[in-house]
Amino acid sequence: MNSDFKIKKSINYGKLNIQLLEPQSPYSLPYDSISNINAIDSDGNVVWKAEAPKSHYSQYYDISVDANLNLLIAIAGSGYRYLINMENGKIIDYYLVK
């Protein structure tokens, strides 16, 4: 985990602690999107880092868990909602919600 960033939101789910790191200023983002979601185990190790949003200059701003579907729901600044696999942090699907 990068200690340079503050944790904006943290969700305990099973043996994982899913952490949304505080988003960076939109003016400092690189062209390629960045991921600011990490899954941490009970020993403090990063198990996975979520796949970055698909749109350019984007990052995640909110997270929630759908326990029925075993999915992480992440909202990106680009207006997309992402469905993320809780096993490996990979994007399963995404759609525009703006």
Image: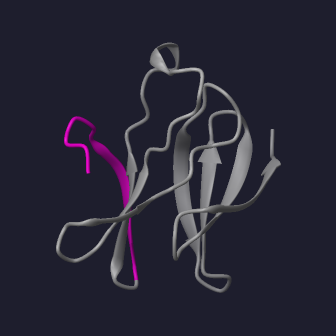
Asked if the magenta segment contains residue 2, the reply would be: yes
Residue stretch in magenta: 1-13
Say whether residue 27 is left or right of residue 42: right
> The C terminus lies in which quarter of the figure?
top right
Q: Relative to 85, is 58 above or below?
A: above
Residue 49 placement: quadrant: bottom left
Residue 5 placement: quadrant: top left
Q: Residue at x 50, y 13 (%)?
A: 27
Out of 48 and 7, give the one closest to the viewer.
48
Picture coordinates of residue 40 (x, y %)? Answer: 31, 67
Out of 49 and 24, give the one closest to the viewer.
49
Residue 71 placement: quadrant: bottom right
Picture coordinates of residue 36 (x, y %)? Answer: 44, 44
Asked if the magenta segment contains residue 21, the reply would be: no
Q: Relative to 16, is 31 above or below?
A: above
Q: Residue at x 71, y 34 (%)?
A: 55
Q: Residue at x 73, y 38 (%)?
A: 79
Say whether residue 72 is left or right of residue 80: left
